[in-house]
Amino acid sequence: MTDNTIDPTKMAGFRYATKRAVVLNGAEAGLDTDGGPWSTLCLRHDEVVAHETRKLAGSWVHHPDEWCEACGAERKAERAAEKRAAAAAARKAAKAAK
Ligand SMILES: [Zn+2]
């Protein structure tokens, strides 16, 4: 999953990074600051969301699946796959118990 070719710490306005997203100073990064001066950017999908405070941006950066549509969809797919795998395992166990 870590196929990032760019080094997020070298991005304009960079403040903080997790493996999946970064906190940027919107003005320094040349981003739209209508929603707030701080932005979170999903490193895999380039989805950007503006936040009113750096603290808010700093808390959202840890949960890109909450604000990045593509990450949210991936998370949903992962959960569905986990559910299917658990159901299959349960069926297998039930069969073995017979
Ligand atoms: Zn994403």
Image: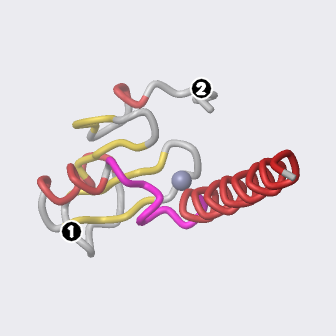
Q: Is residue 49 left or right of residue 13?
A: right
**Res 36 label:** 1
Give the residues in magenta: 62-70
Mark closer to the chain start, 1 or 2: 2
Identity, as a three-letter code, of the amino acid under mark 1: Gly
How many numbered marks appear? 2
Residue hosting label 2: 5
**Distance from Cα at disc 1 to Cα at disc 2:** 28 Å
Q: Within 10 angstroms of label 2, few (less than 14), some, or many (20 or more) residues?
A: few
Nearer to us in this view, 31 or 9: 9
Element type where label 2 sits in the image: loop
Residue type highlighted by circle 2: Thr
Image quarter of residue 37: bottom left
**Residue 68 drawn at (x, y percent):** 49, 62
Residue 67 marker:
none
Q: Residue at x 34, y 27 (%)?
A: 9
